[in-house]
Amino acid sequence: MGGHTVAVIGAGKIGELMLSGLLRSGWPVERLLATARRPARAQELTDRYGVRVVDNPTAVEEADVLAVSVKPQDAAALLDEIGPKVPAGKLVISLCAGLPTAFFNRRLPEGTPVVRVMTNTPALVDEAMSAISAGAYATGEHLALAEEMFSPLGATVRVPESQQDAVTALSGSGPAYFYLLVEAMIDAGILLGLPRQVAHELIVQTAIGSAVMLRDSGEHPVKLREAVTSPAGTTISAIRELENHGVRAAMLAALEAARDRARELAAQAD
Ligand SMILES: NC(=O)C1=CN([C@@H]2O[C@H](COP(=O)(O)OP(=O)(O)OC[C@H]3O[C@@H](n4cnc5c(N)ncnc54)[C@H](O)[C@@H]3O)[C@@H](O)[C@H]2O)C=CC1
Ligand SMILES: O=C(O)[C@@H]1CCC=N1
């Protein structure tokens, strides 16, 4: 990976996923830096990964790639601090939901390459979905470098930046929707009188089996659902209730709300 040093600026949950993923993929710890606001967090990261935790100006000076993983609400303050000090040519990778690359470019020296990445928490098990977009000054080489960094964490896809808020609503937030569904299905098991442990095991394995089939069979989800749904059987009775309760419409409205919230985050961050 060309000897680059990567600094994870604001190593919270997503920053830590990046650090741990890069280390699992064989990235040398000497070529990683992290920054954190709280000293206790810095200590935790060093204890857990052996990574050197430095202050933001040191990270900017020493690293070739700055992976910004602060909350969108904290990005402007961070860029007020480090923006003018970022030497020309360093690659800035933003992991922030909602914020356009132009938000960064307005606060960085003219011509700074910025790549926007929306990843998700299954990075923890190397099953992330990361969508990558180039900002105005990012070249194919910058995109390739971002891909090299994120592909060990799972799948990667390139999308036009204009699609990133929708991507955030789908795959960025997506794991939360599946967890909510699993939680509700386990509760339904309790309603039907199953012990919680049993309900948990049944639903988690069913989720895994369904996910692997979706990925590996190449079949459309409608076809897979139809194969489960016997005439006058149990499944169609459940599906009638899901349709009666507007689950499909709820999904459309929910993901639209997530997309709109990404836009709001950008408007509020400015
Ligand atoms: N949690 C998720 O599933 C996903 C989150 N994201 C994005 O990743 C970013 C981080 O999210 P989380 O990791 O969930 O938040 P988090 O709150 O766990 O991490 C952010 C970290 O940045 C630190 N920080 C803030 N300002 C700083 C500064 N000036 N200098 C150094 N450190 C600073 C905070 O102390 C915190 O530890 C957000 O922009 C979010 O939109 C993107 C995809 C998925
Ligand atoms: O909820 C959020 O804002 C972040 C972005 C995508 C997933 N989590």
Image (cartoon, helix red, strand yellow):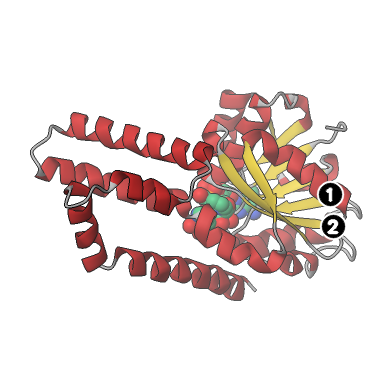
For residue 65, which quarter of the picture? top right
Q: Nearer the viewer, residue 44 or 49?
A: 49
- According to the picture, the residue beneath numbered tag 1 turns out to be 142
Q: Residue at x 53, y 34 (%)?
A: 124
Q: Is residue 80 above or below residue 25?
A: below
Q: Residue at x 24, y 47 (%)?
A: 230
In-image side of 187 versus 38 (left or right): left
In-image side of 103 versus 61 (left or right): left
Question: Measured from the top left, where is residue 201 in percent x and y?
Answer: 27, 30
Q: Which residue reaches farthest left?
A: 193
Answer few, some or many: residues within 10 Å of disc 1's Cα (few below 14, many 20 plus, some between 14 and 19). Answer: many
Q: Is residue 198 above or below residue 139?
A: above
What amino acid is labelled 1 in the image? His
What amino acid is labelled 2 in the image? Ala
- In what element is the residue under mark 2? loop
The C terminus sits in image quarter: bottom right
Q: CA distance from mark 1 to mark 2?
A: 6 Å
- According to the picture, the residue beneath numbered tag 2 turns out to be 138
Q: Is residue 156 above or below residue 266?
A: above
For residue 1, which quarter of the picture? top right
